[in-house]
Amino acid sequence: MKFRKMLKNPRVIILVIAFILALVAIQPNPFVDGVAIQAIEQNSSASQGGMHNPLPNTRPLSKERIIAINNEELSSIREFYDFVSTLKANDTVLVRTNKAQYRLLVQVPGSLGISVQDAPMTNIRKGLDLQGGTRVLLRPAEKVSQAYLNDVMATMEQRLNVYGLSDIVLRSASDLTGTQYILVEIAGASQEDVRELLARQGKFEAKVANATVFRGGRDITYVCRTADCSGIDPNRGCGASAGGWACAFAFSIALSPEAAQAQADATRNLEVIKDGNNAYLSEKLVLYLDDRAVDQLSIGADLKGKAATNIQISGSGAGASEQEAVANTLANMRRLQTVLITGTLPVKLEIVKVDSISPLLGSEFVKNSVFIGLLAILVVTALIYIRYRKLTVSLPIIFIMLIEIFITIGFASAIGWTIDLAGIAGLIVAVGTGVNDQIVIADEMLKGESRQVFDWKKKIKNAFFIIFAAFFTVIAAMLPLLFAGAGLLKGFALITIAGVSIGVFITRPAYAAMVEILLRD
């Protein structure tokens, strides 16, 4: 009878509706199979086979998942990498996902150019603290307008996408003094990748006799990234050097007619120098990246005064072993190609802070958070029961506390906000405030119980006067934190505000209605 009364109560109905909406937003699915695609490397077997990086705003459950390779079903990340490690060059691999089927030709032994992660079972977005990756806080070297800052972020995002990184969170922030920042979170990226792609302005210039003939970005109309015109230079290859190995890379680019003409003008009056059967110009084409010479190329005599639109760019890399040297060389090539495609950042950026968290440590954070959360619930349950000695009062508090957590996480999933350690801290604050408010409601309702004085409306009114006073105090305290700490505390403030708001307007009224129904009779 009392249960039916609860289900008919408008405040409890609102609670049920909010719970259902949170369930739809989170969409838990423990039966997801395969492994999720985290990133696709450019010019890899996967990218040339038609596979693409997941879009930055893709919901976790909507990510493409690899179900099987060569008709062998996958159930874990380890199975995927164990299989890939056995692949040889020119092997053909059939990859079946939940969205399509791809036939890939292996170019690099032991690699398909695919990074994978555990398949998400919910739409809850986990921050770097919980899944691992790199977080970087950047500060413009000079004060710029918000529109200018948006241009910087657009160029940065293009760089990251061209380079093959996904799971990117990129947003502007500021502190209470008005200092501008850009916060970048990249799952699965190393600090080296981030520094090379984001911290550098990416000012690329090619000079002949100190005269600039072309720059990265607008002057370069095409950059080859396919295997037929980019990769390890077949003419120079790899070789042992002092303390290790060194390799050379080369790739072709196309220049605009204006840049080609500038190169022709710069070489028109140069002398021709013969070296055996070869003839070169007296000056070399020197490549500068962020005002630092990174390579120099000999210019063939046949290019003297000629407006050539197609030229070849080269560079090198090193490592302790030949395999490491090849990997580092190709990585250097990819970074340079990325800069040439995307051009120079509109403003120089300074790295303020870099945090790198391993996936294993992130997994431990999740386990510890769940354990501490369950332990806290048990302790609160025990203390509330000791205080009231009434299950009709203590059980609804625990029930509402769990529902409040679920609805708050559902809200975060619905707006696409990531849950990190700051967000978990905000969730704990919101739940703690909720338990305190429910205790206030319980105390008010039990006043005068021995004298059988039950003015329910007055009791609830008194309780919610206290609750709303506390609510506005929390909101006032959290609003500055939305902008403090260069945006690093935004998750804490946002989740706290959302949690206490959900509590005050949804869960607390439902709790008051439930306890009133349970105690009235």
Image: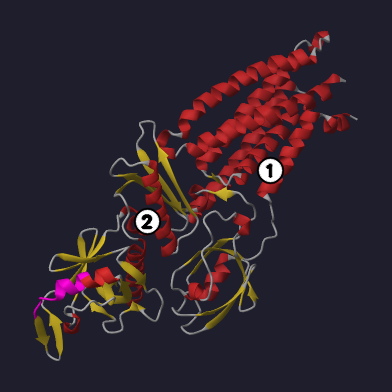
Residue at image position (42%, 40%) is 173
**Magenta stretch encompasses residue 268:** yes
| Residue 423 coordinates in the image, percent (x, y) | 54, 40
Residue at image position (36%, 61%) is 342
Q: Quadrant of the C terminus?
A: top right
Q: Vertical placement of 394 versus 187: above or below?
A: above
Which residues are drawn in magenta?
A: 262-271
- 373 with respect to 312 (left or right): right
| Residue 230 coordinates in the image, percent (x, y) | 36, 77
Q: How crowded is mark 1: few (under 14 residues within 10 Å), some or many (20 or more)?
A: many
Q: Vertical placement of 500 versus 63: above or below?
A: above
How many circles with numbers are drawn on the protein? 2
> Tag on residue 194?
2
Disc 2 marks which amino acid?
A: Val
Camera-side residue of 319 and 89: 89
Camera-side residue of 283 and 129: 283
Viewer can see residue 321: no
Q: Mark 1 = which residue?
A: 22
Camera-side residue of 404 and 265: 265
Residue at image position (51%, 48%) is 127
**Magenta stretch encompasses residue 454:** no
| Residue 369 coordinates in the image, percent (x, y) | 57, 43
Secondary structure found at label 1? helix
